[in-house]
């Protein structure tokens, strides 16, 4: 029988005892725990090690993020850094694991050490003050990471913990709630199936009426009638395409991150000639011109992102971008 796969993401050395405890807890529940040190991740020798972790995240059913006082090692997509100071900004492997889970809308549960969250509250009141020495965190990026998590409109439950037993109790309650929702959804699915039958019947009736109207219009007004029918067909086709475009999760994420409306995102994808063009234009919209190069570098090393962008291009019936 298939087991739910639970990916546990955190820095290792400062949280290894908590990771071990959570691994045992997950296995006791009969789920499959995925941790880098457990050897459960299949590493591809042709790509950086952290890219294998991001790929493994995509195949998991639940994502558990633990944030302690360490921000972690820079991702392979970052420029090589011999050392980092407290205020140096960079993307860590743990942060990108979270972003990959978030991009796939994987149910996510976030645990933050109480001492770290307390210092985050201090940071919020002193964002521009670089004279403060924070005792429990090693990088300002941790605070930026928490900022990003809190800015999400959904799928970001947070629990502050001191002991591992608190983590287990909270996760038990959360996953029990998830299981209850699943049962409820199965009940409502039966009702949806009945409704879908009625919708199909209405669709058949609508098709019949459409044919009647086309026959009447074409016979009544000759050439103008056919032009009207053709124009309406084009309008309906575009409306269907835009509905599919708006429903795409990648488009929704871009709209959330950039505050663009659906027509502006449509223009962004329609006007781009290639991945580089899209990265530069998107960075300019965000007001972060320097981010364009970093975005393109990340896309170059992450084929799943390229695939998702091309999926949006398919919806718009546009030529696919050449793989980087």
Image (spheres, rainbow, N blue to C red):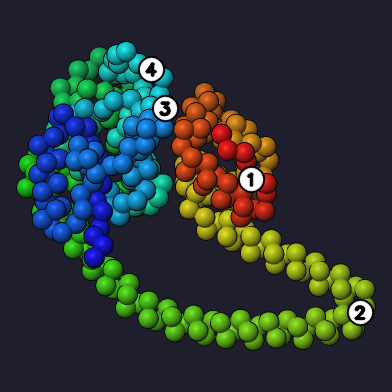
Q: Which residue is mark 2?
A: 221
Whether residue 324 is situated above or below residue 65 in the rendered picture: above
Marks 4 and 2: in contact by CB < 8 Å? no
Q: Which residue is mark 3?
A: 77
Looking at the image, residue 70 sits to the left or right of residue 268; the answer is left
C-alpha separation, residue under disc 2 versus residue under disc 4: 71 Å
N-terminal-most mark, 1 or 3: 3
- Disc 2 packing (10 Å; few <14; some 14–19; many ≥20): few
Q: Which residue is mark 1?
A: 320
C-alpha separation, residue under disc 4 versus residue under disc 1: 32 Å
Which dot marks residue 80? 4
C-alpha separation, residue under disc 1 versus residue under disc 2: 41 Å
* SS at badge 3: loop
* SS at badge 1: loop
Whether residue 111 is situated above or below residue 30 in the rendered picture: above
Q: Position of residue 63 (x, y in %)?
A: 27, 48
* SS at badge 2: helix
N-terminal-most mark, 4 or 1: 4
- Nearest to the observer: residue 251 or residue 158: 251
């Amino acid at each position: 029988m298939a087991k739910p796969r639970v990916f546990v993401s955190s820095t290792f050395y400062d949280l290894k005892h908590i990771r071990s405890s959570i691994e045992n807890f997950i296995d006791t529940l009969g789920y499959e725990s995925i941790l880098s040190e457990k050897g459960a991740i299949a590493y591809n020798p042709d790509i950086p090690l952290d890219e294998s972790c991001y790929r493994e995240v995509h195949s998991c059913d639940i994502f558990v993020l633990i944030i302690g006082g360490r921000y972690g090692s820079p991702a392979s997509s970052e420029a090589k850094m011999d050392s980092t100071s407290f205020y140096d900004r960079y993307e860590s492997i743990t942060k990108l694991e979270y972003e990959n889970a978030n991009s796939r809308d994987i149910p996510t549960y976030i645990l933050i050490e109480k001492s770290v969250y307390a210092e985050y509250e201090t940071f919020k009141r002193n964002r521009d003050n670089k004279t403060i020495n924070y005792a429990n965190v090693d990088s300002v990026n941790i605070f930026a990471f928490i900022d990003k998590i809190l800015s999400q409109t959904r799928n970001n439950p947070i629990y502050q913990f001191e002991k591992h037993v608190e983590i287990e109790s909270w996760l038990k309650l959360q996953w029990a709630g998830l299981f209850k929702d699943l049962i409820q959804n199965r009940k409502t699915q039966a009702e949806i199936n009945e409704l879908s039958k009625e919708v199909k019947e209405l669709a058949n009736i609508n098709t019949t009426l459409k044919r009647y109207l086309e026959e009447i219009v074409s016979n009544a007004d000759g050439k103008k009638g056919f032009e009207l029918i053709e124009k309406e067909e084009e309008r309906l086709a575009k409306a269907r395409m835009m509905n599919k475009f708006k429903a795409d999760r990648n488009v929704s994420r871009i709209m959330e991150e950039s505050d663009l409306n659906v027509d502006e995102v449509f223009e962004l994808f329609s006007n781009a000639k290639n991945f580089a063009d899209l990265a530069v234009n998107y960075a300019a919209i965000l007001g972060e011109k320097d981010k364009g190069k970093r975005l393109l570098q990340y896309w170059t090393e992450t084929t799943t992102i390229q695939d998702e962008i091309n999926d949006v291009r398919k919806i718009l019936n546009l030529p696919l971008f050449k793989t980087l």
